[in-house]
Image (cartoon, rainbow, N blue to C red):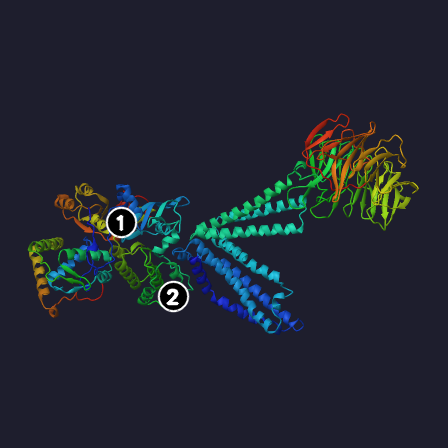
Amino acid sequence: MNATFRIDASDPRPIWRQIEESVRNLVASGALPPSASVPSVRELARGLAVNPATVAKAYQRLADAGVLAVRRGDGTFVAAAPPAITGEQRGERLRTEALRYASFAATLGASLEEAAAALAATWRDLARPPGDREDEAGPARKGGPT
Amino acid sequence: MRGAAAVLRHELAQRRLLLLASPLLGLLALAAPLLPGTADAGGADLRDTAVLFVALALSGLTALLLGSSVIGADLAARRLAFFFSRPLSGAAIWAGKLGAAVICAWSAALLALLPGLLVDVAAGAGGSLLYNALVPRPLLALWLGALPLLVLVTHFGGVILRTRSKWLALDLAGAVTTAAVALVTFRRLQYWAWLDPGWVARLAAAGLGLASIGLLAASAAQVIAGRTDPVRGHRSLSLTFAGISLAGVLAFAAVAVRWLAIGPQNLDRWSFAAVSPGQAWVALSGPAPGPPEYAASFLLHVGSGRSLRTRFARGTDDVFPVAFSADGRRAVWAEYDGAQESSPVVLLMDLDRPAAEPVRTAILERELPGRLAISPHGDRVAAVEGKRVSVYELAGGRLLATHSFEDLGEWPEPVFMGEDRLRILLSRWNVVTVADLDIPSRKLVAVATFPDLGWRRSLSPDASRIAINSPAGAVAVFDLAGGRQLARLSQQGARVRANYLADGRLARQVVGPDGAELVLLDGDGRRLPDSPRFRLPPGAAFGWIFQADADRLLAREDLESREGDLQAGWKLLDLRRGRMLSIGPRSLQALMPPSPLTPAGKAPLFTDGTHLLRIDLETGKRQLLGPARPFHSVYRPPM
Amino acid sequence: MSLTAVSVSTIAGSISPKVPAAAFTNAHAGAAAASPGAAARIAAWPLAAEAITVRYGRRNAVDGVSLSLPEGAVYALLGRNGAGKSSLVRCLLGQQRATAGRALLFGRDAWRHRATLMAQVGVVPEQPDAPPGVTARQLARLCRPLYPCWDGSGFEARLRRFDVPADRPFGRLSKGQQGHVALALALAPHPRLLILDDPTLGLDAVARRAFFEELIGDLADRGTTVLLTTHDLAAVERIADRAGILAGGRLLLDEEIERLKQRFRHIWLPSPTPGADAALDALSPRGRVRRNWRVETLVENFDEERFQAFQASPSGAGAEASPLTLEEIFVALTGEGSRQLAPGAEGDPR
């Protein structure tokens, strides 16, 4: 999981929020299947080079929300039945990111059609099996710590 | 404690190499006899000396290097914070590091000696190394004791030189001031208190001890208060050391001032007192509070209470000659010019004015005169140096006449007979010779010779007769012109004593089992029919008899005991009425002229232990003159 | 804006049994003013500086600085060279006497009780200060009896992880290795408080990364309280939960990094319009610079609603707000242009 996301310093969101949301996204996308083990606070903190208390805070919230489950003695795992993101939550999240994308496109002077076309093309790329992907620049492909 | 031990062990472990090298160097020194050119020096002695030299040099170098670096280097390189960031008290850091430097120095010395010692023991000499003549054992022990001091000194110097902060000014100022105060005080003490070498050694040791304490406290303050800041460390170091050394030296100076700034009333007691003819001045001395054998001497003007500090007393019993002229207008005495017993001078003072100051005469003698005599009008002085009698003109110091004698048992006794004639009494074996020195012609004329029956001599006022008291208890009266015995005063089963009075009569007392009896004789020793008799009970006797005036005598009553005479008190002997009156209690002591040949006057001076007073012998009235101290004379003036 | 307190103790052991409750509170002064009881509690925290002033001659190197660290906090003290960081750290370590004010460690005066307090404090200095002729192992042998507990195997393990030969004299180690030894020595007695004075100065990226990983591991295992002075702002952003900026001896800022980043925004207008200045002023800017064709404004206390209103307004059309990294905030507050951008800033940034 370490390789799956980075902490973005220029992101206004607090680091714990970034971690929390990344984990949520990984779980929701299936990259972290139910009952899979996740790195310990210590490991993740070291891997991301962040304060363990920050990671602990994110994990706490995830545990409270039912996304992660802690089994004493065994470690931390994805919950057997992680709560699905409600349609409302998903819609809200999509709108947030969409606002960002739309603002960006607007500064380039692109029209709605152009932006939508680019979005659709990227979506199709992601859905293809890994071997077929043209763009291998995703951070998931690159190994090593952030 | 645990912290200091940890630091100590750490520092010692870092200097393992040095400790390893020491015995090796000591081993090398054993090969000294193999060096070329040393064939004639004793092999064992040379070896021992080489080993000792190596040990001393190595330990000294270690102390120097480690003392300046063990804390100083870390401080300068900003590495001391390593220790201060650990749970170590400042004291532990200081003690551990400096302790390691000292232990290294000691170990270097002892380890370097080890091979030599082993060889000595193996050769059967049994530690002769330590009995080396060149470096005796006390010196070795002293050296080992000096090593910690060396460490402290180099640490101090290292801090100062490395930091180079403005506190250097305080260090210098403090050192200069301390040294100046110490030196000035020491010289003053030497001059006024005659410090002997034992005392000098003691003062030096005290000074060294103070410096050591100062260095120790200063180095601790530097580490504990200064911590990692070199400048603050220097500040603590300077303030502590300057504070301690200045406080110590100022205390020393204060004590010295207390010892030196004294007057006659501050002496423990008066042990020597001589009143001038005319009773205007008293020359006195006595032990004073301060170093042992510290005595101070003064010339006290009775009327005004003004006292002049002089140096004619070197100890309680050691008083240099003081002489008053017969007209009471001049005094001379002998002193040493400096603090050492060198360059003696003869000082002169006109006694006419109370504000008089002594003047150095131009009289030069090689040694301090043993006796001084001054002519009746004070123009000439006779000085006795060893076996030589010299007469000088006081004004100008011109030598008028001198004569050297041989085969003398004592110093010659000079007595002026007028301004131009000096009568000299010479003791040789059992014979007393009287010689007259004619000053203008410088010729010595033998006058008389007679057997010396004793040691108590009383010369008549005109120096024509002499009464000699023998220890056996007899008195012989001689005519000095021809040497003829005029009288022999003795009594079976009793002791006879006699001395001349100022008017030429002889006061004779017989001390027997049923008491003492005093009677007056004429100058030749013949009875005077109208002389009253005075008696004292058994066990009491009169001392010197002084003449107050034509009708009154003053005599001291001595109680004879096994330990010696105890002074009981002074008695007034009224010759007209034949009565003996006690002047006062035993504590009342009279201050008499140097010799009974000078009249004591109608109102002689006394002291009751706290006051100086004059007692009018006619009326018995007392007049308080000023403060005084108990007077118990152990000094018997000559004649 | 209040932040919820995270009570991690409700999570069972496997996450991190030793991360203690960290109460993220507001600025030190505010809480102290709240009640005297609060002030006393704060004074008993692992580290508290109370109005510390350090004066050299006429100059105040540290001027009335107050800050405090609760248990488990990681505090980054930032400042340009000469801002007074080292003097402050020396006061906190009891190695220098403050001209005024107190430095308290665990509620006790640092200057007076330094020797006993250092048993609970690990120190990594800016310059390596171990004696150069001593090996790492000998240093451990020196330090071990001084502390109540000493993790010797942990020390050796750390040296191995850092690839530091335990028997080479300290002076012959590389700078990075020396820093690692210093950290290992500081962590071995399991201190409750760590004070690191620019520990990664002069270290290459690899050594720096290894250093922080070791520190994070210790934080995860034991929840040590940490005070860190550094120029490595990227690392600060991730590791520290609170930051203070020292400039001219004064503490310009002292708050949580999260909150700091939420408060500051960089707004730029592509083309300034007549009403833009006034409207920008209403956003409580910290300073404004006009560069060629656009206006850049650093806004403190950013408010999302107000900005959106501004964007919607005619003078604010095309305005963009972007967040700043900690480094940018730091430079803006203390850099050369800081006086331009921050007219209300106190003190000399130098």
Q: Position of residue B29 (x, y in %)?
A: 58, 70
- Tell me the element at label 2: helix
Q: Position of residue B578 (x, y in %)?
A: 82, 29
Q: Amino acid at mark 2?
A: Arg
- Tell me the element at label 1: helix
- Chain to which mark 1 belongs: C
The residue lying at 66 percent from left, 51 percent from top is B197
- Chain to which mark 2 belongs: C
The residue lying at 93 percent from left, 42 percent from top is B482
Q: Position of residue B460 (x, y in %)?
A: 86, 37
Q: Is residue C293 visible?
A: no
Q: Looking at the picture, tell me which residue is in the foreground, B256 or A17.
A: B256
- Do dots 1 and 2 share one subunit? yes
Left or right: C254 as drawn, with respect to B54? left
Looking at marks 1 and 2 on the same chain, the residue that comes earlier in the sequence is marked by: 2
Q: Looking at the picture, tell me which residue is in the foreground, C308 or C73.
A: C73
Q: In the rendered view, tell whether residue C288 sits above or below residue B355.
A: below
Q: Quadrant of residue B471?
A: top right
Q: Which residue is mark 2?
A: C137
Q: Quadrant of residue B442?
A: top right
**Hey, which residue is sitting farthest front in the picture?**
B514
Q: Looking at the picture, tell me which residue is in the foreground, C47 or C183.
A: C47
Left or right: B157 as drawn, with respect to C259? right
Q: Amino acid at mark 1?
A: Ala
The residue lying at 18 percent from left, 55 percent from top is A17
Q: Which residue is mark 1?
A: C332
Q: Position of residue C160 (x, y in %)?
A: 32, 67
